[in-house]
Amino acid sequence: MDETLSHDFVEQARQWRLDLHRHPEMAFQERRTGDFVARMLAEWGLEVRRGHGRTGVVGTLARGSSSRSLALRADMDALPIHEQTGAAHASVNPGIMHACGHDGHVAMLLAAARLASRRDDLDGTVHFVFQPAEEVAGGAREMVADGLFRDFPAEAVYGLHNWPGLRPGEAVARDGAMMAAFATFEIEVVGRGAHGAMPHEGADPVLCAGQLVSALQAVAARNVSPLKAAVLSVTQIHGGDAYNVIPESVALRGTTRWFEPEVGDLIEERLGLTAARVCEAFGCKAHVRYERRYPATINAPQAAGFLRAAAARSGLAVVDAEPSMAAEDFAFMLEARPGAYLWLGAGKDGENPGLHSPRFDFNDAILASGIGLWNEAIGMAIGRG
């Protein structure tokens, strides 16, 4: 750990984290969080701009005359989950909680900005990007569309995520694929309702939907090469209101994941065709809504190497791991600028709830590691000498 990261300094970051955890906000509603971030950045002398991605905040620190630059990103939003941690700092907003550790990400990047504002060995510019709406709503896409990198030019952009599947002190920044692309789908199976005692008089969408769930598993299992990653999961089934009535329709909803663009195209094509043909066989119709949400998160090798070097210099053990089929909208920033994404080990002894669990709480023991990593990255990118 960097010697400048005193106990009191890290403890202050922890207090910010606990406050943010108590007051979680959903996508594009991060007004209190944005006010908190903007106030801190301004106190430390950074130039603060708001409004990119609606509720986004960017703090810029410029030193010297060098044109060197980088952007560091933290996500701010929470999830629609009822917290079950029992912690003293649990959410005061019913049905909303920081179940993914974005409170910790904000605290670490804020502390890194504070530390950078005190340094006298920098020659260049660093943009501290606090992004809204990472969870499904695509806040990174909106920030980029609003001119993030036009207004805040950066040679590279970097992000991290706490990772309970790794031990504290470990870090992963792979060359190439880190996180999968993802889409959502809804299939409305439209049949013909009937009395439950006289099913032959209708076209049963419940029976059809059951067969369709099974058939959809063949999209990945029998259409995509087993050497390539693909996931299709039906996660919701909705239909019917009475025990003795076959309904008019049933809705299936779910998600798909992939890395290679051609695999994504194949999944979408075969999902639509499978739904149409299975429903036709049961005398039903399929209305398919398919929406691609995030592209794959792909690290530029040179940027990933830079991030691994910064991690090692900060005292982290750089390890390797397989890519994750989860998704991350930082992918939109990586499409716009070279950069890399890192997983920071955050596992806990004993019960170690995963991301998005109602029992998840950010591991404060890794705050110093995240701050130290960003501090090293800033020094390597724009430090004098």
Image (cartoon, rainbow, N blue to C red):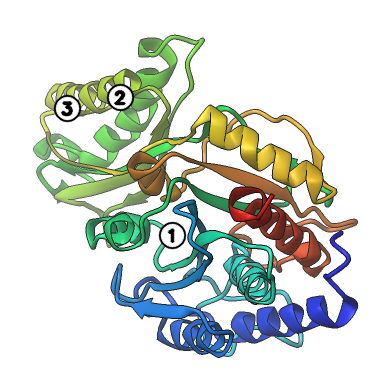
- Mark found first going from the N terminus, 3 or 1: 1
Structural crowding at the residue carrying mark 1, measured as other residues with C-alpha within 10 Å and reported as few (<14), some (14–19) or many (≥20): some
Q: Can you tell which of label 3 and label 1 is closer to the viewer?
A: 1
- Residue under the point 78% across and 58% down: 369
Q: Quadrant of the N terminus?
A: bottom right
- Residue under the point 80% across and 65% down: 368
Q: Report the residue marked by disc 2.
A: 267
Which quarter of the figure has residue 358? bottom right
Q: Is residue 343 above or below residue 41?
A: above
Which mark, by number, is residue 282?
A: 3
- Mark found first going from the N terminus, 3 or 2: 2
Is residue 160 something one can see in this rendering? yes
Which quarter of the figure has residue 324? top right
User: Secondary structure beneath disc 1?
Assistant: loop
Tell how many labels.
3
Residue type at mark 3: give it: Phe
Q: Can you tell which of label 3 and label 2 is closer to the viewer?
A: 2
Would you say 56 lies left or right of 178 here? left
Would you say 198 lies left or right of 126 here? left
Q: CA distance from mark 3 to mark 2?
A: 23 Å
Structural crowding at the residue carrying mark 2, measured as other residues with C-alpha within 10 Å and reported as few (<14), some (14–19) or many (≥20): many
Foreground pick, 227 / 246: 227
Q: Report the residue marked by disc 1.
A: 135
